[in-house]
Image: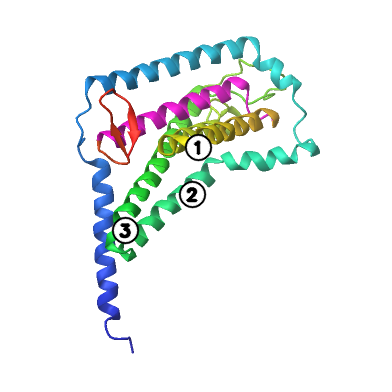
Amino acid sequence: MSAPGTSSSSAGYFSQLALVGKFSIGRLVRRPQAAPDAASRQQLWRQLLVLVGIGLATVLVLMIAFDATEIGLMPARGTPSLWPWRIVTEFGQDEYVLGLLAAGVVVTILIVPLWPEAARSRLLNFATHVQFLFFALLSSVLVAQVLKYIIGRGRPFVGGKANAFNFDPFNGTPAYFSMPSAHAVTAFALAFAVAAIWPRLRIPMFIYAVIIALSRLVLLAHHPSDVVAGAVVGLACAMLVRYWFAARRLGFRLGKDGRIVPR
């Protein structure tokens, strides 16, 4: 026999959980609460244009002058001494990072109804930040997968030689999913997103992203230009998601000077 009040407590929890879930989803898709002014829009597009412009120029230079040389300098695949790099690179695996963030989103939503009402706003604010991290990464990974399929660049030594211009668009096989590097996309999107929320972590997160990118080169999974392209995609998508959240006053706010700052 159930203890008195057990069923009513459960019903109360699930009703609150439904409200929290509806509230969380509704905030993400609602119209902007803070009307984006010209300064914030101009700053965003200026930053994106500079990022993409420098990124594309760097990719082209690397493809022409350095990609084939760099992969020729790397140790052969399967070299036993590379085992530390094989461990390190897993920390940039998009499935793992997305899974961890998705779990964080679910857990925070599940515990909100159990949290004391006086402290619930702080937990909701933390949940908003976790949601931002998740969507910044998810959007970056989805864009990267589409680009990989369209571009169809061969991974290093696919075809038997160091050829930086081995392209087979719409091939759709892992051997031709080299550009952009998904690990670089994940690492740089996550680094930007974390630093956007907690600016003091920008240096360690930048170091993390660079190490993940280097691991892809050492393991001959990508060309240098693939890694740069991945960094550009990850940063650009995370910037757009931050703007989406800021316009809805979710975890960020739009400053009068056009800057986006955490709340």
The range drawn in magenta is 220-247
Badge 2 element: helix
Q: Residues within 10 Å of mark 3 (few under 14, many from 20)?
A: few
Any mark on residue 201, and which? 1
Residue 239: x and y in percent read: 39, 29
* Residue located 70% across and 19% down the image: 70
Q: Please indicate whether residue 258 sits to the left or right of residue 232 in the image.
A: left
- The residue type indicated by label 3 comes to Ala
Which of the two labelled residues, at mark 3 and mark 1, occupies the earlier sequence position?
3
Nearer to me, 186 or 251: 251
Image quarter of residue 254: top left
Q: Nearer the viewer, residue 120 or 55?
A: 120
Q: Is residue 190 at all visible to an observer of this figure?
A: no
Q: Which residue is mark 2?
A: 99
Q: Is residue 232 magenta-colored?
A: yes
Magenta: main secondary structure equals helix
**Callout 3 secondary element:** helix
Looking at the image, tell me whether mark 1 or mark 2 is earlier in sequence order.
Answer: 2
Instruction: Give me the C-alpha separation between circle 3 and circle 2.
Output: 27 Å
